[in-house]
Amino acid sequence: MEPVAVPPTQPSLVLRGHREGVIGAIFHPDDHLVATSGEDATIRLWDATTGEQVGETLTGHTDTIWLVAFHPEGHLLASASEDRTARIWDVATGKQVGEALTGHTAGVYGVSFHPDGGLLATGSADHTVRLWKVPGGEPVGEPLTESMDEIDGVAFHPDGHLVASTGDAVRLYDTATGRPVGVPLVGTTKGAVSVAFSPDGRLLASGSDDLTVRIWDHAAGRPAVDPLVGHTDVVDGVTFHPSGRLLVSAGEDCTVRVWDVATGKQVGELETGHSAPVWNMGFDRSGSRIVTASQDGTARILPFPAYPAAG
């Protein structure tokens, strides 16, 4: 099947307010809010229906905020920043909870909550992954250090027993012990920069500096399909559709591409309206909407079309 460009059936909502590029964007667990973060060192919350900003801008970081993540219960938000800290925020008040999480010796690029909400994982340009207690922010165990490259992304397995990280390879660690699990997933000619588990936890996707997307059978330690080729620049974001049948990737080539997970074939390209690199994106619970974050200074909430593989 040839890839098709399927325009959304409704107009997108354009979220304007950041003074520079928008890098992180994610739906709240109950879908009523979207959180965004950017190069202007701020976090903003938006009404996911109207596109209007909700409450005051969250400030405290002193440099680019790369990613944000909602706690599974939705009352907390975590952020990862170039200022070498991660922070936890109260969503209702917009206030920081406790002190900044310090310990990384370079920019913090990745952040992810454990599915039970009791842990936070961060990945850094210092080549380490760190685990923290939530909400107190106390470090858990020693830093996980194996990568020979910066760690741009971290993700917990849906049942929480594994945490995955990017770098010179995609690596898996036992959440309870911090020990490596299986073999490093190596296949890219350059480093992996983004990572996501499928909803059922069976597969793992990664985006890379080598312009490819990979889908891995992580338990077997091998690719599940051939490399996904089509992007013409770095793939900064990957996320699975809630159905698990589609994978979406965002790239510095300004495109958002849609792939059939079973075959690895591109089935479409989302018309986002962005005019600059797209850094990240996230689905609502139903998979009927997607939010995208771009260097053009906007985030956009788009209806997600019924691509052929989802029919």
Image (spheres, grey):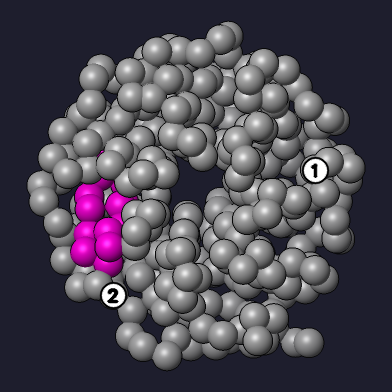
Image vertical order of residue 44 relative to residue 8, above or below: above
Q: Nearer the viewer, residue 268 or 163?
A: 163
Does residue 109 show up? no
Q: Nearer the viewer, residue 19 or 182?
A: 182
Image vertical order of residue 133 relative to residue 92, above or below: above
Where is residue 77 drawn, in percent x and y?
A: 32, 39
Where is residue 48 drawn, in percent x and y?
A: 27, 67
Kind of residue at badge 1: His
> Could you give the CA–CA distance between mark 1 and mark 2, rounded to whole angstroms?
36 Å
The C terminus: image quadrant: bottom right
Q: Quadrant of residue 84?
A: top left
Q: Is residue 44 magenta?
A: yes
Span of residues in magenta: 32-48
Where is residue 24 drawn, in percent x and y?
A: 39, 49
Secondary structure state at the residue bearing disc 2:
strand
Secondary structure state at the residue bearing disc 1:
loop
- Looking at this view, name the residue that lies furthest to the top: 142
Where is residue 113 drawn, in percent x and y?
A: 47, 36
Residue at screen point 22% across, 50% down: 44
- Viewed as shown, does residue 266 lie left or right of 143? right
Residue at screen point 17% across, 44% down: 92
N-term mark: 1 or 2: 2
Q: Is residue 65 magenta?
A: no
Kind of residue at badge 2: Leu
Instruction: Identify the residue position indicated by label 1 in the image.
Output: 218
